[in-house]
Image: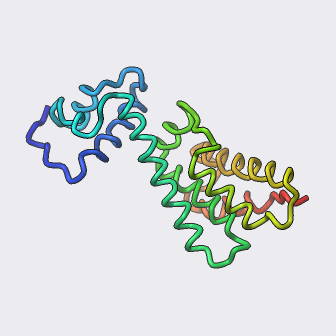
Amino acid sequence: MAKNSYHHGNLKNELIEKGLEYIDRNGVESLSMRKLAESAGVSCAAPYSHFKNKQDFLKAIQDYITERFMDVLTAAAEYCRDRSRLLTELGISYVRFFYKNPLYYSFLFNRNFPDLETYSPFLFFRECVIMTLGKDLDEDKLRYGVIALWSMVHGLAGLITVEGLIDPEHIPEEIEKILTTVDIRR
């Protein structure tokens, strides 16, 4: 272990990123705080400065990813000047975020899917759908529309790495074409 590499700008975030890589390679079951420290090149005690135990670490990873995901979604909403494009811009941002961070997608959604009733990105997305389409839809149609739209962008985020499905050089354009083929108001 390289103890002289301990000088980190943000050890907590580095441990989270190294932990994601470790989990991707070896599985969450084989992760220990000692193995986490080794993968980050720090002392065995260093992770305990930020996390009580493995469960606390796994929760911190989920919070870390969720916070970054929320930042991307809220930035997309704030940047979008044309409210008629809001849902398209959110969809593009959703897919691009997980395309750039596939370990985040895998960790969040392949292990233990978050409870959507309390998951802040879903709640934000739902509010944007209500704001954008709420006046055009009855309560049932709106509820199912939110689920359909979330499912579509979530599925696209999961499929984006399938070679040939979406041109990685033109993600925004391709995602927009896919998203605008569906109209839940029918």
Indicate whether 76 appears above or below 140. below
Can you name the residue that lies furthest to the left here? 4
Left or right for 70, reference 150? left
Q: Residue at the location (35% across, 43% down)?
A: 17
For the C terminus, give its image quadrant.
bottom right
For the N terminus, give its image quadrant.
top left
Can you name the residue that lies furthest to the right here? 186
Q: Residue at the location (24% across, 35% down)?
A: 47
Task: Measuring from the top left, give residue 99's x and y in whole percent.
Answer: 53, 51
Can you name the residue that lies furthest to the top here? 30
In this rendered view, identify the residue nearer to me: 146 or 56: 56
Task: Measuring from the top left, give residue 128's x and y in whole percent.
Answer: 68, 62
Left or right for 48, reference 43? right
Task: Measuring from the top left, give residue 94's x and y in whole percent.
Answer: 58, 55
Task: Measuring from the top left, give residue 44's x and y in whole percent.
Answer: 18, 29
Q: Residue at the location (35% across, 25% down)?
A: 31
In this rendered view, identify the residue nearer to me: 68 or 56: 56
Q: Residue at the location (61% across, 74% down)?
A: 80
Q: Quadrant of residue 89?
A: bottom right
Left or right for 7, reference 99? left
Indicate whether 36 appears above or below 123. above
Q: Quadrant of residue 167?
A: bottom right
